[in-house]
Amino acid sequence: MTATDIYVTGEGERELRERYQELLTRWPVPSERLRIPTREGETSVITSGPPDAPPLLLLHGSSTTCVMWLGDVATWAPHFRVYAVDLIGEPGPSAPSRPPLDSEAYALWLDDVLDGLGLSRVSLVGASLGGWLAVDYAIRRPGRVERLALLCPGGIGRQKAGFAFRALFLLLFGERGRRRLLSMVMGDAPSDPRFAAYLDYAAQIARHFRPRRERLPVFGDEALGGLAMPMFVIVGGRDVLLDSRDTERRLRRLVPHATVRHLPDAPHGLRGHAEPILAFLRDSTASAGGGR
């Protein structure tokens, strides 16, 4: 794919690039932007935290960028060398490539990212599509994954088929419909100005960016059952995209050592969970044999 395939117009692409750069000026801790060459093209990574700290790789969701971690990175950076990756094929500055999800392509891409960063083993935090990528990588490369923290991850529970039809209907109403769609996915906007700015950015992305149409492959029982690293998973009961109860049921059945937290009133776009994720990442007692 090329940039012209994933953006509605060239002007829209430029607008999103400028907004991305503006939002990065709000990154709450000292950071450096790295450009990692991979077989899928250049990958942009924002790195923060002590260089000698344990590595933590962040994988954002679909139709967004590493900007989604603005409210979390200050919690994690004092304890980890944090690498916020801009996924390929998404509206950040990484390559527009979108290889098939039902292949080893994304694991090979992450191999290149880790090798380019000089990392042999990392902990992963992934949200939605990023959660799918984290699980896919952990299944294919278990020796390179220390821990998994997942927010409403794809590929475990069923996707809700009816949402696509509701989304298409709402998009008929232009900007008002896009805002309503974002509200359904992200929940009601709080008073936090950082989140309000992020919602404006998400609406801008919705105007100018062509999202993925490919459904996320669902991982088989054997693949999920083979995950042995410590896992912490948070799902929202009001997730309009994924069946949270199905995610929870499969994990409890197939990955009994995983800690699964079901928040009945939370939407798909989870926020404000940096502290419990930090506690999990730093918990020396959390292991493959640990309890819930």
Image: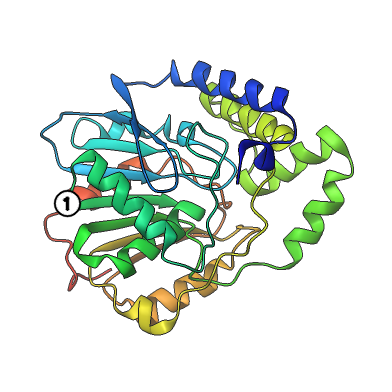
Q: Quadrant of residue 186?
A: top right
- In the picture, measured across the screen, residue 184 lies left or right of residue 256, that is right
Q: Nearer the viewer, residue 5 or 220?
A: 5
Q: Is residue 27 visible?
A: yes
Picture layout, residue 69 above or below residue 235 = above
Dividing the picture into quadrants, the one containing residue 136 is bottom left
For the point 17% across and 51% down, the residue is 120
Residue found at the very far right of the displayed protein: 172
Q: Which residue is mark 1?
A: 120
Three-letter amino acid code of the residue under disc 1: Ser
- The residue depicted at 47 percent of the width and 31 percent of the height is 67
Q: How busy is the neighbourhood of tag 1: few (under 14 within 10 Å), some, or many (20 plus)? A: few
Residue 117 percent across, percent down from the top left = 23, 39
x, y percentage for residue 272?
A: 43, 40
Secondary structure found at label 1: loop
Eyeballing the image, is 257 above or below 27? below
Identify whether 45 is placed above or below 250: above
Residue 288, how many percent across, how many down? Answer: 19, 70
194 with respect to 58 (left or right): right
Q: Is residue 128 visible?
A: no
Percent of width and height locating residue 8: 74, 35
Q: Judge whether 66 appears above or below 246 on screen.
A: above
Where's the C terminus, which quadrant? Answer: bottom left
